């Protein structure tokens, strides 16, 4: 299956959303709180509306799942999964790791992914069978094969520190050579580009993961939840360079 058209549309829409986000950084932002107490701005909603309208115009039969507007059914067996601003907190504070995420799922498989980081001037993207790229240059995961030599990133060890999964993640991070703090979807892009060897997240949602699932896979890496299931719909996600995946799964499934 050729996803060239879908990729080009996703890249165009993510780029347009990035322009809106960069322009908004020049002004004070009105911040609201959602039911889960996470922040949202008018820019989040404007970007999701732009993306949704653009996708519906070109692919009217496709479904849609967006962080701000929820799910809309389609008839094609495909669904676009979108986070208009992944990292709204960094966006509000002017930290440049926020991103626009657009992914396409077809028959349960992640087949297109775009991570556009406008403030960093980096766009990671991939489509099924066509490889992964950063700003038009092919990217590949790292070749690190030992956990004690790994550079990783994780989210949830603090927030879920009183749960077994949080305790295990924190202990596992101490065994890596170096642990970065979580940098939103930029962490996932770094795994795909070989800058990080792995990333573990026990907090995020499908719209945070869909684009990265395609990109990391096409860069030679892999993903799963802690139980080893290849899904973006669990309560955990691990992205790795493939070489470390069995080791990190074993460590998280069998705490010392």
Image: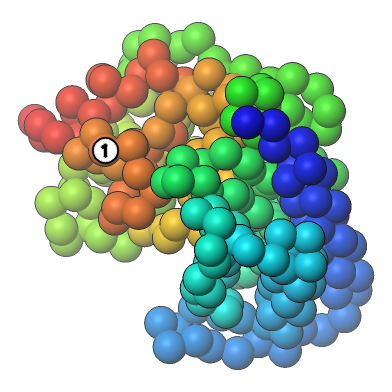
Q: Name the side, left or right, on which 252 lies relative to 201.
A: left
- Residue 254 occupies which quadrant of the picture? top left
Is residue 113 something one can see in this rendering?
A: yes
- In the picture, measured across the screen, residue 80 lies left or right of residue 107, that is right
Residue visible at 53% across and 74% down in the picture: 72
Vertical placement of residue 67 versus 119, above or below? below
Q: Position of residue 147 (x, y in %)?
A: 34, 18
Image color mode: rainbow
Q: Is residue 61 above or below residue 28?
A: above
Label 1: few (<14), some or many (≥20) within 10 Å? Answer: few
Q: Is residue 250 above or below residue 181?
A: above
What residue would you read off at disc 1? 229
Say which of 11 and 85 sits in front: 11
Q: Nearer the viewer, residue 198 or 170?
A: 198
Side (left or right) of 148 relative to 42: left
Q: Quadrant of residue 102?
A: bottom right
Q: Which residue is depicted at the point 60% across and 90% down?
A: 32
> Where in the figure is residue 141, as x and y percent of width and height?
56, 19
User: In the rendered view of the protein, which quadrant contains the C terminus?
Assistant: top left
- Camera-nearest residue between 64 and 176: 64
How many numbered markers are drawn? 1
| Quadrant of image for the N terminus | top right
Question: Is any part of residue 119 visible from this angle?
Answer: no
Q: In the rendered image, which quarter is residue 31 located in?
A: bottom right
Q: Whole-percent x and y of residue 36?
A: 41, 82
Taking the spot 29% from the left edge, 42% from the top edge, the residue there is 225
Label 1 sits on a secondary structure element that is: loop
Q: Position of residue 204 (x, y in %)?
A: 42, 58
């Amino acid at each position: 299956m050729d996803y060239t058209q879908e990729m080009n549309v996703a890249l165009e829409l993510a780029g347009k959303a990035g322009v809106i986000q960069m322009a908004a950084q020049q002004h004070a932002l009105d911040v609201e709180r959602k039911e889960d107490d996470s922040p949202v701005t008018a820019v989040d909603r404007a970007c999701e509306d732009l993306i949704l309208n653009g996708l519906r115009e070109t692919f009217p039969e496709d479904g849609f799942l967006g962080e701000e507007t929820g799910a809309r059914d389609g008839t094609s067996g495909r669904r676009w999964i979108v986070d208009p601003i992944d990292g709204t907190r960094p966006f509000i504070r002017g930290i440049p790791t926020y991103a626009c995420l657009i992914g396409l799922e077809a028959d349960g498989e992640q087949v297109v992914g775009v991570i556009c980081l406008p403030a960093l001037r980096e766009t990671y993207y991939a489509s099924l069978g066509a490889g992964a790229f950063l700003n038009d240059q092919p990217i590949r995961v790292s070749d690190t094969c030992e956990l004690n030599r790994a550079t990783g990133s994780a989210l949830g060890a603090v927030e879920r520190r009183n749960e077994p999964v949080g305790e295990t993640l924190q202990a596992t991070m101490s065994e890596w050579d170096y642990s970065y703090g979580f940098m939103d979807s930029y962490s996932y892009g770094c795994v795909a580009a070989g800058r990080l060897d792995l990333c573990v997240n026990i907090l995020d949602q499908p719209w945070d993961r869909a684009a990265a699932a395609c990109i990391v896979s096409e860069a030679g890496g892999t993903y799963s939840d802690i139980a080893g299931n290849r899904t973006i719909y669990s309560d955990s996600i691990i992205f790795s360079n493939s070489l470390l995946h069995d080791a990190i799964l074993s460590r998280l499934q069998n705490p010392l």
